Amino acid sequence: MKHYQLIVFDLDGTILDTLEDLMISLNVALQKNALPKRSLEEVRRFVGNGIGMLIRRAVPSNADEDTIRQVHTDFTAHYKVHSADHTRPYEGIPTLMRQLHEADRQIAVVSNKADYAVQDLCRHYFPGLIHIAVGEKEGVRRKPEPDSVNEVIRLSGIPKESVVYIGDSEVDIQTAKNAGIDAIIVEWGFRDREYLIEQGASTLVKTPAELGTLLL
């Protein structure tokens, strides 16, 4: 494995298990608008392309745009307060982050989650360990477009050949491809191994310890 100087992590399903908090905030917003709730497994399938797409996948297919906007507003209001109620780092991830930091690797996070939540969660769970974090915001196209990854690479000053992207979904596989960088895909996130292989994953890891062995 190459010596990577910049490690770019996806957030949800890769370093943080955020699924329960996403489901709770989504269901609060759906109920406020008299819409049916969604299960954890449904939300698992819906995530990966940002909050806007999560909302559109969760509401009934005949929902109008005003309803979709209101569900989005209600979700945001709840999630801003409750994004860390049940969210936790995956076992072994805090240790891996500290090891990378001590080995003088730069660590970045890019996510399709709203930027306010990305910043809050990185500060809360990985204080002092994340050099750059970029979430969904105006002027930055969502993954799998490479904008957020390219911005991180630009800010780091590290050449692309020394950058690796770590993610858990088909969106992450395509993001790394679009950015022209190597990818390592984790198996503990929101998609299963067979699906990831079908989507083009070539390097997969089962545990954070295995990932650390590749990176260090």
Image (cartoon, rainbow, N blue to C red):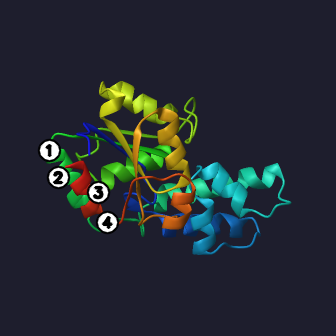
List x then y, in percent, for residue 45. 61, 64
Q: Which label was assigned to residue 211?
A: 3
Label annotation for residue 99? 2
Name the residue: 79% across, 64% down.
60
- Look at discs 4 and 1 and give the one toward the viewer: 4
Whichever of labels 3 and 2 marks the residue nearer the N terminus, that label is: 2
Task: Tell me the number on the disc at residue 62.
Answer: none
* CA gap, disc 4 and disc 1: 19 Å
Q: Is mark 2 on a helix, strand or loop?
A: helix
What residue is at 52 percent from the left and 59 percent from the top? 196
Numbered circles on residues, count: 4
Q: Reply above or below: 49 against 154.
A: below
Q: Residue 207 carries which label?
A: 4
Indicate which disc, 4 or 1, sits on the residue closer to the N terminus.
1
Query: Where residue 8 sits: x, y (%)?
Result: 36, 43
Distance from label 3 to label 4 (Cα)?
Answer: 6 Å
Instruction: Kindly identify the amino acid type of the residue bearing the numbered disc 4.
Output: Thr
User: Looking at numbered disc 1 in the image, what kind of residue is underneath it?
Assistant: Ala
Tag on residue 103? 1
Q: Is mark 1 on a helix, strand or loop?
A: loop
- Cβ–Cβ under 8 Å for marks 3 and 2: no
Look at the numbered disc 3 and give the secondary structure of its residue.
Answer: helix
Q: In the rendered image of this protein, does residue 11 appear above or below residue 180?
A: below
Q: Nearer the viewer, mark 2 or mark 4?
A: 4
